Amino acid sequence: MKAAFIKTSFASIATALALQAGAAQARVQYICPELDTASNTLSVSVKSGCMSSSTSYVGNDLSIAVDQQRAHIAITGDIEFGGGGQVVTADCMGAKSIALTAEGIEARRYTVSYGDGYIGLANLLDDPAPKECLQTAQAKLPYRYPTVHKTEFLGWSTDRFPGREEWRSATPMELVSNVLGTYPETDEGNFDMELSFKKMMWAGWPAQRTMPPHEPFLAVRIERHGLLDDSVSGDRYFIAMRFDGEWKVEELWGQSMCSRGENAGQWTGKPCL
């Protein structure tokens, strides 16, 4: 995912810079590819992000591999620092940038990975010198995720799937299929469904929760219309999932769009009669 350098408050910087004296710190946070189309030379700046001048650069074992058949750039290794001395708030003088190069590289849209994780797309075909850097997982601070508050689901039902606490799966879609199977019959000509996946954080961190407050979760929203049911024309769900060796459902809320009765044409958490 492309991301500009993070604008961080002084308090957040102080937290990020807190290093134990003498401890080695691995700190690759940003990867910035740029292509010289005249010489077909790929230059990648691998940056540590903000580091205090009280830390010392230890070294790096960074390397780059470009697979042009797969249009993929792989960066491995890390930048290491040694702690020591008093950390000065908002002092970023210890930041380090390491340059990696590769020759004979053609202008393409490259997927980019750091270590064993995909981090985004470098469109070096349309923009050989992108203004934004790709961000590694180490730079993705939780507070940057969009938030949702549990009060948004007042009036939603929580008891539609007895035993969902026991659901486990290797993929999120397998869990979603447990919900999508609720109404197997649809009016195909009029059926409509929206399905979205997004990492989010809980806002307000309610006292009654099942997930750690500072840990992002996968939010799945489902909305369907055109269901073949005498009393229900549509439904919608919000599922909060978390991966802990396997995917599981932490929270699940649902509502129905009634097709008749006093709640016809309205979302409700109550049964449609």
Image (tube, grey):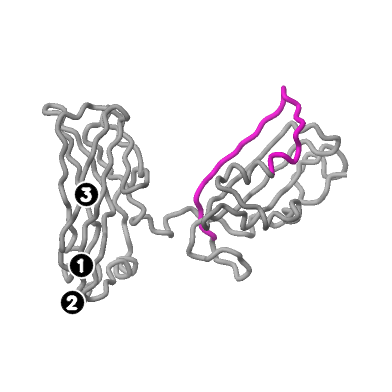
Looking at the image, residue 162 sits to the left or right of residue 127; the answer is: right
- Does the residue at mark 2 contact the one at mark 3 (Cβ under 8 Å)? no
Which one is nearer the viewer's eye here, 71 or 194? 71
Residue 208 placement: quadrant:
bottom right
Dot 2 lies on which element?
A: loop
Q: Quadrant of the image for the N terminus?
A: top left
* 2 or 3: tag closer to the N-terminus: 3
Residue 209 placement: quadrant:
bottom right
Q: CA distance from mark 1 to mark 2?
A: 10 Å
Image coords of residue 74 (percent x, y): 28, 41
* 1 or 3: tag closer to the N-terminus: 3
Q: Which residue is mark 2?
A: 85
Q: Which residue is mark 3?
A: 46
How busy is the neighbourhood of tag 1: few (under 14 within 10 Å), some, or many (20 plus)? many
Q: Quadrant of the image for the C terminus?
A: top right
Residue 234 included in the magenta stretch of the image? no
Give the answer, above or below, for where 51 lies relative to 74. below
* 1 or 2: tag closer to the N-terminus: 1
Q: Which residue is mark 1?
A: 52
Which one is nearer the viewer's eye here, 242 or 204? 242
- Does the residue at mark 1 contact the one at mark 2 (Cβ under 8 Å)? yes
Looking at the image, residue 148 sits to the left or right of residue 20; the answer is: right
Specify the amino acid type for callout 3. Answer: Val
Q: Residue at x 29, y 70 (%)?
A: 14
Which one is nearer the viewer's eye here, 105 or 45? 105
